[in-house]
Image: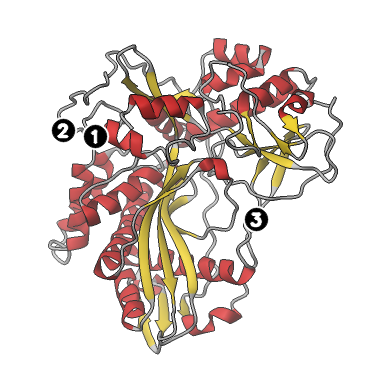
């Protein structure tokens, strides 16, 4: 259910918009999706012999690292040779599967994972093609924003029909009243990073970052503090969370962040973008012991509908957006020593604030906005907290799957709302929010006599109205699709991204 478009759907200069966009397919029965995870240095199970499924990778390995070959496959997943030497191309891995007795089953598992996470059902002909030739999977992983939106709607229908279970909610670790001065004594084990073998020599999952356990714990604690403060506006009087800081108790995000700033802490925010590591795949280099794992570049690819004069379409890797919040004590801060970060975005596991505990491979890229501090940082965090509560309350009231993920937005939408509200512009792509759901929730709150003039809710409402939906052509899509490319020119891992930058005018 796409949200309304406020701007006239005129085509941006130098590109053309599609006249016939395929309708999203009906859903397959889905199971609980998992949020995309990141890869990094890791150890894993002992490698299989090269003949046991991944002999096809042997030709892509030179000495210590995997090296992408320059074979022209025509796939959007074709890598620029040599640019990311510890990354191997998805088509090569799938070709390796084709020569393995377990290849068909592994490709089917990856295809099922795609359908479960997106809700997009594929025609039987595509499923049969993947079974016959795993390399055909790359075509299934290219989707339009409209198909993404339709798939999320299908997941919600499956959830209401009892075919899909909600993801497990995050568990609260802190007591209802928590004193920040006791942070060091909190018993908070580091979240696990695990790998799962999906085929001989092919793994999915995440590995731990090099961030120290002490810093990870601080970030986990601060993430939960922000998350629970965000829920307070609709929590019962006996369920509100309180955080004590320097002898004072706080129950709102705005008051708590303001107190940190007044006590001399540096609080800043910035808006970050990288590629969403959709399949989170790693391959073991044949013959290495202990196993040497290399990244497999396997994102979801977005068909933008924007084309050059010859009709070639810009295809970009699906981006993940987040607002990074940094808190540091510095020499003059009055209170406990803090060096914590938390990330705000909407994901399958919920909307709100998350610690960063996993490693991220180089090929995902990264773009970072200039940091905002002072009043702008306070406003951004306050809006993020209020947005979290609005989304959770609307999802609960309407019985939406995964706290409304997709219907009320994805990571890009949630971050775009905050950036738009604070700076007057947003750069995220694609945007999928169904505006009516959250606008209805905001109308209810702004009709409440106690909150009629609430500036935070009004800022969220205005940002939602101002932002387009990429399920339909709109004049900012070209600019934002270009901004979603998280590599400087000359660092794009995919040949298709090099083409997309040219088509989009970059």
Q: Disc 1 vs disc 2: Cβ atoms closer than 8 Å?
A: yes
Residue identifier under label 1: 476
Q: Which residue is mark 2?
A: 7
Mark 1 secondary-structure assignment: loop
Q: Is residue 256 left or right of residue 439?
A: right
Snapshot quadrant of residue 58: top right
- Residue 82 - label: none
Q: Is residue 382 above or below residue 500?
A: below
- Label 2's element? loop
Camera-side residue of 38 and 4: 38
- First along the sequence among labels 2 and 3: 2
Residue 208's disc number: 3
As measured in the structure, the alpha-carbon distance from the residue carrying label 1 to the one carrying label 2 is 9 Å
Q: Nearer the viewer, residue 36 or 270?
A: 270
Q: CA distance from mark 1 to mark 3?
A: 37 Å
Q: Position of residue 85 (x, y in %)?
A: 64, 37
For marks 1 and 3, the one nearer the N-term is 3
The quadrant the N terminus occupies is top left
Image position of 137 (left or right of 27): right
- The colour style of the image is secondary structure
Estimate how packed mark 1 is, as few (under 14), some (14 to 19) or many (20 or more) residues with alpha carbons within 10 Å: many
Q: Position of residue 257 (x, y in %)?
A: 34, 73
Q: Nearer the viewer, mark 1 or mark 2?
A: 1
Q: Identify the secondary structure beneath mark 3.
A: loop
Q: Is residue 58 above or below residue 251?
A: above
Q: Position of residue 135 (x, y in %)?
A: 63, 18
Query: Image quarter for residue 362?
Result: top right
């Amino acid at each position: 259910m796409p949200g309304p478009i406020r701007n006239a759907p005129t085509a941006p200069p130098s590109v053309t918009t599609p006249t016939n966009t395929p309708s999203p397919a009906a859903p397959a029965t889905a199971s609980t999706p998992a949020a995309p995870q990141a890869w990094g240095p890791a150890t894993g199970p002992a490698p299989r012999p090269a003949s046991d499924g991944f002999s096809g990778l042997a030709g892509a390995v030179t000495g210590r690292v995997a090296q992408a070959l320059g074979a022209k496959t025509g796939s959007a997943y074709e890598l620029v040779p040599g640019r990311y030497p510890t990354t191997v191309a998805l088509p090569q891995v799938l070709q390796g599967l084709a020569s393995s007795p377990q290849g068909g089953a592994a490709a089917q598992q990856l295809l099922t994972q795609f359908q479960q996470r997106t809700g997009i059902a594929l025609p039987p002909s595509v499923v049969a093609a993947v079974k016959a030739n795993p390399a055909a999977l790359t075509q299934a992983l290219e989707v339009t924003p409209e198909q993404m939106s339709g798939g999320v709607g299908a997941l919600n229908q499956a959830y209401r029909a009892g075919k899909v279970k909600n993801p497990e909610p995050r568990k609260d670790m802190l007591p209802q009243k928590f004193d920040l001065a006791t942070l060091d004594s909190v018993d908070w084990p580091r979240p696990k990073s695990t790998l799962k073998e999906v085929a001989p020599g092919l793994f999915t999952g995440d590995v731990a970052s090099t961030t120290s356990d002490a810093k990870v714990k601080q970030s986990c604690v601060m993430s939960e503090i922000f998350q629970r403060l965000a829920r307070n506006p609709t929590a019962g009087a006996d369920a509100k969370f309180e955080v004590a800081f320097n002898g004072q108790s706080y129950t709102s995000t705005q008051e708590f962040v303001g107190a940190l700033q007044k006590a001399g802490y540096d609080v800043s925010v910035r808006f970050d973008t990288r590629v969403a590591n959709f399949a989170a795949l790693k391959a073991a280099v044949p013959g290495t012991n202990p196993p040497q794992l290399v990244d497999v570049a396997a994102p979801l690819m977005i068909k933008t509908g924007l084309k050059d004069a010859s009709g070639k379409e810009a295809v970009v890797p699906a981006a993940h957006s987040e607002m990074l919040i940094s808190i540091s004590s510095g020499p003059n801060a009055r209170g406990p020593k803090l060096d914590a970060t938390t990330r705000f975005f909407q994901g399958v596991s919920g909307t709100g604030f998350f610690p960063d505990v996993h490693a991220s491979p180089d090929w995902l890229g990264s773009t970072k906005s200039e940091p905002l501090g002072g009043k702008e940082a306070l406003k951004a965090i306050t809006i993020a907290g209020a947005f979290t509560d609005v989304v959770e309350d609307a999802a609960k009231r309407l019985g939406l799957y995964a706290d409304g993920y997709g219907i009320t937005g994805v990571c890009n939408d949630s971050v775009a709302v905050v950036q738009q509200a604070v700076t007057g512009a947003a750069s995220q792509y694609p945007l999928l929010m169904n505006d009516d759901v959250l606008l209805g929730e905001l109308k209810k709150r702004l009709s409440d006599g106690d909150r009629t003039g609430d500036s935070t809710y009004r800022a969220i409402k205005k940002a939602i109205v101002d932002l387009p939906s990429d399920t339909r052509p709109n004049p900012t899509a070209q600019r934002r699709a270009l901004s979603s490319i998280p590599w400087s020119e000359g660092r794009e891992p995919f040949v298709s991204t090099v083409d997309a930058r040219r088509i989009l005018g970059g």
